[in-house]
Image (cartoon, rainbow, N blue to C red):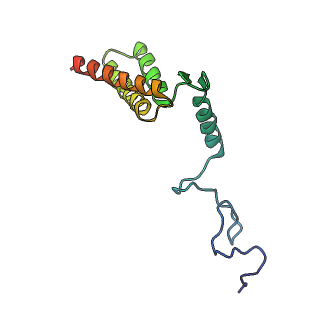
Amino acid sequence: MLGAGAAGSDPSGQRPTGTATSDHRTEPAEQSDGRPEDPVIRRCWRAFHSLTQLGFPRRFPIVQFPNVPLLTAWIAGWAQHFVAAAGRPYLTSVVYLAMTVWAYEELVHGSNWLRQLLGGAFMIILTVRVAYAV
C-alpha cells in the first residue's frame, strides 16, 4: 500500500478527470453534469458567444449580432418560403415561439434600457399578433 506522500498520489483521494486509470486507459474529460466534453464544440460555442456580445456602439449597444432565438426565428421564417402550405403553420409557430423567447430575454436581461424597452414592445406586438391569429 502506498502512503499519502507517494509520488503521483492525490491527498484528497480523487483522480482528476482526463487522467489515466490503474489499467492505463485514459478517461475523457467530463463536464460538471457528467457528459463528455468535446473541445471543438466548446471552442465553437465560446466563439459564437463572444460574437453575440459584440455591439454597436460599444458603451450603449443598440445593434448586436443575433443570438440563438433570433437566428432560429430567422431560419424558420426563411424556411417558410420553401415548405408546402401544410407545413407553414408549424414554422410560423416556431417563429413566434423563438421571438417570444428573444423578447423575454431582452426584457429581463437586456444590456440597457433601450434593449429592455425593445423586448417589452415585442412582447406586446407578439401577444397582439397571436390574438389576431386565433
Return the x and y of residue 131 as percentages of the image width and height.
23, 21
Residue drawn at x 61%, y 27% is 54
In the displayed structure, 86 sits above or below 30; it is above
Residue 111 visible in the displayed image? yes
Would residue 4 appear left or right of 112 to someone viewing this image? Answer: right
Q: Residue furthest left?
A: 134
74 on left or right of 17: left
Q: Which image quadrant: the N terminus?
A: bottom right
Q: Residue at x 51, y 55 (%)?
A: 33
The answer to which quarter of the image holds residue 60 is top right
- Residue 102, by quadrant, is top left
Q: Is residue 132 left or right of residue 123?
A: left
Q: Quadrant of residue 25?
A: bottom right
- Give the residue furthest to the right: 7
Residue depicted at x 62% and y 43%: 42
Q: Residue at x 28, y 23 (%)?
A: 127
> Residue 78, image x and y in percent?
45, 16
Closest to the observer, 79 or 95: 95
